[in-house]
Amino acid sequence: MKYDVSKKLTKGAARVLDAHSKAMFELLASIPFEDITVGKICELSGYPRATFYNYFDDKYDLLDFCMQAISKYVNIDDYSGLPIGAMIEIYLGRLYDILAENERAVVGIFAHNMRDGYFIASTKNHLIAEIRKMLLRSGLPKSCPVPREIMAEHYANIILLVCGKRYDNGNRLARYEALAYVKYLIEGPAGGGRF
């Protein structure tokens, strides 16, 4: 990303970033990521291409920014040091809240973006990175026999699977059901599905 978002944003920069993010999500809800162009993003955002390129290298860069913005909203930093199960429960709960608040767009995103397409793969990779951070903050014993990378991918796959099921076949999986599924999938029958 060309713009340093670690610094305090000006009102103008915040408007530009917000307009482009909203345009990206609106387009994702109506067409596959692969069909999205910078021209379509600019047309929908109301900003010229030159402005887009002042902030982003390309549509992939904008998508990364959108994922980072969601991560800031979900923010788990306040819960570092909690057991990994508790952190995943908080993370999934906040993620589920975002999905519920943006239900219509999310349904469109899942309908238009194939599970093996770039958007879903990018989302999964972002989720793995977030869970890796959780694992590092959770105080997971260094003597754990399973490498953190494998555990991060495993937890990310569980979260994506459960979140994806919220939108499969018109069934709406309630938040409490999703949390129960994740608990069970992580702990298994021996753990009673408890973190």
Image: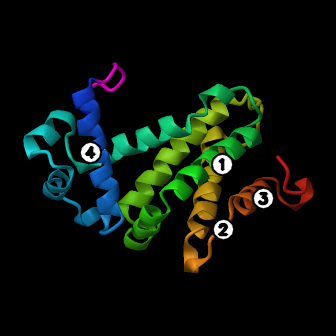
Q: Could you say which quadrant of the image residue 136 lies in?
A: top right
- Tell me whether circle 4 and circle 3 mark residues in contact (CB < 8 Å): no
Task: Determine which of the numbered discs, if any, sits on residue 180 in the image.
Answer: 3
Is residue 156 toward the left or the right of residue 55 in the image?
A: right
Residue 140 is labelled as none
Q: Taking 185 as reference, is 20 above or below it?
A: above
Sooner in the amino-acid sequence: mark 2 or mark 4: 4
- Crowd class of label 2 (few under 14; some 14 to 19; many from 20; radius 10 Å): some
Marked residue nearer the N-terminal end (4 or 3): 4
Q: Is residue 5 visible?
A: yes
Task: Name the spot of residue 186 as percent of width and height, x first.
Answer: 76, 53
Q: CA distance from mark 2 to mark 3?
A: 11 Å
- Where is residue 80 shown, x and y percent of the image? 67, 27
Classify residue 71 as left or right of residue 138: left
Label 2, label 4: how far apart the Cα atoms are? 31 Å
Q: Residue furthest top?
A: 7
Question: From the viewer's perspective, is the residue at label 2 or at label 4 nearer?
Answer: 4
Q: Specify which label sits upstream in the sequence, 2 or 3.
A: 2
The residue beneath circle 1 is: 93
Disc on the earlier residue, 1 or 3: 1
The residue type indicated by label 4 comes to: Ala
Three-letter amino acid code at disc 3?
A: Ala
Position of residue 179 relative to residue 84, above or below, is below
**Magenta segment, which residues?**
2-9
Q: Is residue 142 above or below residue 40?
A: above
Please, what is the three-letter code of the amino acid marked with disc 1? Gly
Residue behind mark 2: 173
Earlier-in-chain disc, 1 versus 4: 4
Q: Is residue 69 left or right of residue 128?
A: left
Residues at marks 1 and 3 touching, judged by CB atoms closer than 8 Å: no
